[in-house]
Amino acid sequence: MSLPGLGEPQFVTVGYMDDQQFVRFDSYSASQRMEPRAPWMDKMDQDYGERNTRNIKIDAQFYRVDLETLRGYYNQSEGGVHTLLCLFGCEGSKNGSFRRSFYQYSYDGRDYISLDTETLTWTAAQPSALNSKRKLEAERRIAERQTAYLKKMCVQWLHTYLEMGKDALLRTDPPFAQITRRTDLDGGVTLRCQAQGFYPAEISLTWLRDGEEQLQDTEFIETRPGGDGTFQKWAAVEMASGEVDKYTSRVQHVGLPEPT
């Protein structure tokens, strides 16, 4: 991130395992080190932190050069605030095998370019990214190196972290669900089913009328953090006052032995 008046651009990197942040580095921090952000990271030896801090500082220099290059592509002066974001990661199955990966860049909040790890080709999200596409595809080893990391090393680390943090990452906290009722001035009724305190985040809330799902008539909010390491979500449905008894809610979550 280029920050006018504050000298060298700031570089921040964070690591997430599922929804939990476990490491962070900030070039503006006093420690100048990669810092653990999850209790289970205390199981890592000292060499892990020192090695990754060195690697991150090297990465920071490359990203600062890339930021300057992109500002040139867009004919931008040095005085503005600009951000270059790289998002990459992998998913693995329970048996340790690779499932999928992603590697993509955005610039100033807009998608810029992404790597297809199956074809080893780059997709430009906007015309200005065509310069980067040509350069990256002329150096095929870049795509090969990133893909090899995502499909092998990344998955190995994923399962290492999962084993260390299994008490937190593999826990299943069941949702606490309650239904509230609101009657409008015109006599209409809104029933809301709210589930909270659950982990992991995947959950299904549905309203049924005479046993049939009412997806089109149901209002949902996206699953969101509850502020205590768990999640919350609600689903609401409107009806005439005389039809309330026809509606039931259904909650499905891995922490429940069966839907409730």
Image (cartoon, rainbow, N blue to C red):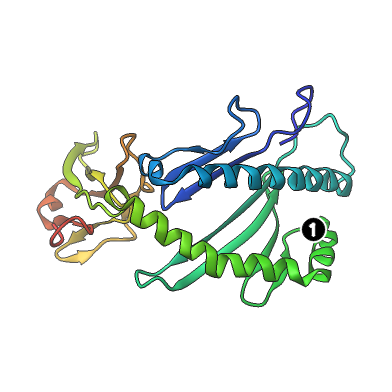
Residue found at x 37% / y 56%: 162
Q: Residue furthest left?
A: 245
Q: Position of residue 49 (x, y in %)?
A: 53, 42
Nearest the eye: 243 or 53? 53
Q: Quadrant of residue 131?
A: bottom right
Q: Tell me if residue 45 comes above or below residue 227 in the rendering.
A: below
Side of 149 where 168 appears, left or right: left
The quadrant holding residue 132 is: bottom right
Task: Specify the quadrant that holds the N terminus.
Answer: top right
Who is closer to the viewer here, 174 or 208?
174
Q: Quadrant of the C terminus?
A: bottom left
User: Dot 1, crowdedness within 10 Å: few (<14), some or many (≥20)?
Assistant: many
Instruction: Specify the farthest residue to the bottom.
Output: 119
Count of picture labels: 1
* Amino acid at pointer 1: Ala
- Viewer-nearest residue: 195 or 99: 99
Answer with the quarter of the image where residue 122 lies: bottom right
- Depth order, front residue of 38/102: 38
Identify the secondary structure beneath mark 1. helix
Measured as percent of width and height from the top left, residue 188 is found at 22, 43
- Give x and y (percent) for residue 174: 19, 50
Q: Can you identify the residue that label 1 sits on?
A: 129
Residue drawn at point x = 53 percent, y = 69 percent: 152
Left or right of residue 236: residue 12: right
Q: Residue at x 15, y 55 (%)?
A: 247
Tell me: residue 180, above or below residue 104.
above
* Residue at x-position 82% and y-position 55%: 128
Residue 139: give x, y in percent of width and height.
81, 68
